[in-house]
Image (cartoon, grey):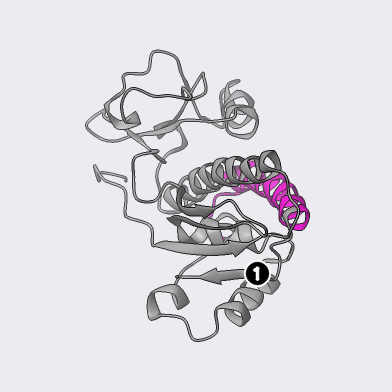
């Protein structure tokens, strides 16, 4: 039975990327925006699957029935949300819950703990949330994104559709990595784990595949497939 009031911290890392020459500024900003939003969704999916695998009941997960504001006035943890959708395999709201995560631009998913306190699975103010650590608008453009490492691995190696190949490519790219990076578990590995309940995994895997397909296209268009450095 779940009785912890806190979420375990996810490993955080930085990724440096270099794009191709000749990109317009709107293409670069679009890439940054979509990558950070996909990172949020992947981190949410990873959290749900990990918690569910560790026995958290499905009705402890709630999705807010609106996207996060573009300019939020406070952290999600301090916000009182009025309209929330509870996830339950036995409820008609199941599809709506997953629809919010998949289709809303900035989904907010909450965990309700034993004290009836709502804890956001990904808060934009947390260290785990994707952040533009540095960026140089030049030709070619280059930048550093910091955030939960498991989701970053999947996004920046999204062209490797198989989880095994994605991890092998990561190890090849990073070479002699730190112990911290070598021990990181990708978000996809958690989502696809046999420990994840089948009902949860079915929905999460479908969204994982959609995110990786979209991100792989972004990576190709901006030209960063072979221009990535981890843990910079």
Q: Where is residue 114 in the image (x, y as percent from the top left)?
A: 25, 35
Residue pictured at 77% horizontal, 53% vertical: 221
Q: In which quarter of the image is the C terminus?
A: bottom left
Q: With 216 as the anchor, is 62 left or right in this view?
A: left
From what the image shows, is residue 177 above or below residue 186? below
Which residue is nearer to you in this view: 162 or 67?
A: 67
Residue pictured at 51% horizontal, 70% vertical: 230
Question: Residue 73 appears in which quarter of the rendering?
Answer: top left
Q: Position of residue 86 (x, y in %)?
A: 47, 25
Question: Residue 112 appears in which quarter of the rendering?
Answer: top left
Q: With 144 as the anchor, is 194 left or right in this view?
A: right
Q: Which residues are drawn in magenta? A: 194-221
**Residue at the extreme front of the image, as rendered:** 138
User: Is residue 195 visible in the rendered structure shown here?
Assistant: no
Q: Which SS class for mark 1?
A: loop
Write down the residue under mark 1.
Answer: 227
Q: Where is residue 3 in the image (x, y as percent from the top left)?
A: 25, 44
Which residue is nearer to you in this view: 177 or 134?
A: 134
Residue pictured at 46% horizontal, 22% vertical: 69
Q: Is residue 181 magenta?
A: no
From what the image shows, is residue 129 above or below residue 145? above
């Amino acid at each position: 039975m779940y009785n912890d009031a806190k979420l375990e911290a996810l490993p955080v890392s930085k990724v440096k990327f270099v794009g191709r020459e000749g990109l317009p500024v709107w293409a670069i900003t679009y890439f940054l925006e979509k990558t950070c939003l996909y990172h949020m969704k992947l981190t949410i999916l990873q959290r749900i699957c990990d918690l569910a695998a560790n026995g958290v009941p499905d009705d402890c997960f709630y999705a807010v029935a609106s996207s996060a504001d573009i300019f939020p006035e406070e952290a999600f943890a301090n916000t009182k949300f009025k309209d929330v959708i509870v996830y339950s395999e036995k409820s008609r709201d199941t599809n709506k819950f997953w629809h919010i995560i998949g289709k809303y631009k900035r989904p907010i998913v909450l965990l309700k703990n034993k004290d009836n306190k709502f804890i956001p699975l990904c808060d934009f103010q947390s260290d785990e949330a994707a952040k533009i650590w540095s960026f140089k608008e030049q030709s070619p453009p280059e930048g550093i994104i910091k955030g939960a490492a498991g989701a970053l691995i999947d996004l920046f190696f999204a062209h490797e559709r198989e989880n095994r190949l994605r991890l092998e490519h990561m190890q090849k790219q990073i070479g002699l990595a730190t112990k911290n990076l070598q021990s990181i578990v990708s978000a996809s590995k958690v989502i696809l784990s046999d420990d994840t309940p089948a009902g949860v995994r079915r929905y999460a895997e479908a969204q994982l595949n959609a995110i990786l397909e979209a991100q792989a296209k972004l990576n190709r268009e901006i030209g960063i497939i072979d221009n990535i450095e981890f843990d910079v």
